[in-house]
Image (cartoon, rainbow, N blue to C red):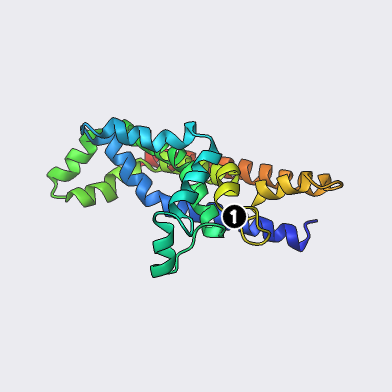
Amino acid sequence: MLDSAQLDILALSLKVAGTAVAASLPLALLVARFLARSTSRFRMVVDALVHLPLVLPPVVTGYLLLLVLGRRGLIGGWLAEHLGLVFAFNWTGAALAGAIMGFPLLVRPIRLSLEAIDRGSEAAAATLGASPLMVWLTVTLPLAIPGILAGLVLAFARALGEFGATITFASNIPGETRTLPLAIYSFIQVPGGESEAAQLIAISLCISLGALVLAEWAARRIRASRHEI
């Protein structure tokens, strides 16, 4: 049975991961569409930038975030002074770190789904008078839902398990930025904390497996409904 402190850690972790995914989804859709459909000379540059967090050490990503969005950072100081937005050493900073680290895993499945869509379906909708926006909303997005679901699950799991960038940019503050991986790390550093760490590890496994199963079930239901139509 989880105590109140562990429940708080779980709630904060879900809030951070959920916020990270929800905030990055609109941009991920736009970037995936650009990578899947554009013939621009900058496409390779954008693709490299999107996947950069996968090859950079997470601590480097966190340090760069601190330089840019910290209270004395290039942009963070202005945001704090004029808009009251503070990311460093705040749960919003943990969400931002999770969003950046999970962004490549969100974009790639969506991009692959868009590339697999038969362009004839979109062309048929356009010939019937649908605007580009309506074609995107009524044809392209529904056909890309399996890829979107896969990307959401991968990004959510990555944000939920993010450690290096989070501890560097948002620190390990109890009740504020101490998410599941940071709490597990803290418990295993304390003599006798192995049991608490084991409980949180079990919770992390259950959440991750549950999200994967749910996404697969939803994708199968969507494919089945299309065959019925």
* Residue 214 seen from this side: no
In this view, 203 is above or below 104 = below
From the viewer's perspective, tell me whether residue 75 is left or right of residue 159.
left
Of 165 and 104, which appears nearest the observer? 165
- Residue 112 sits in quarter: top left
Callout 1 crowding tier (Cα within 10 Å): few <14, some 14–19, many ≥20: some
Quarter of the figure that contains the N terminus: bottom right
Horizontally, residue 181 falls left or right of residue 90, namely right
**Residue 19 image offset from top left, x and y in percent:** 50, 56
Res 165 visible: yes
Q: Position of residue 134 (x, y in %)?
A: 22, 52
| Number of dots carrying numbers | 1
Q: Position of residue 10 (x, y in %)?
A: 66, 55
Q: Left or right: 99 with respect to 176?
A: left
Image position of 5 with respect to 40: above or below: below
* Residue sitting farthest toward the front: 72
Horizontally, residue 133 falls left or right of residue 28, namely: left
Specify the quadrant that holds the C terminus.
top left
Residue 162 vs residue 226, the one in the foreground: 162
Q: Amino acid at mark 1?
A: Leu
Quick one: 161 or 189, which is closer to the camera?
189
> Which residue in the rendered view is the most extreme toward the right?
192
Percent position of residue 121, x then y: 23, 38
Q: Residue at x 59, y 42 (%)?
A: 164
| Residue found at x 63% / y 41% | 209
Comparing 85 with 66, the one in front is 66
x 51%, y 48%: residue: 97
Instruction: Find numbered disc 1 in the image and state the secondary structure of the residue it sits on.
Output: helix
**Residue positioned 73% across, 57% down in the render:** 6
Residue beneath disc 1: 14
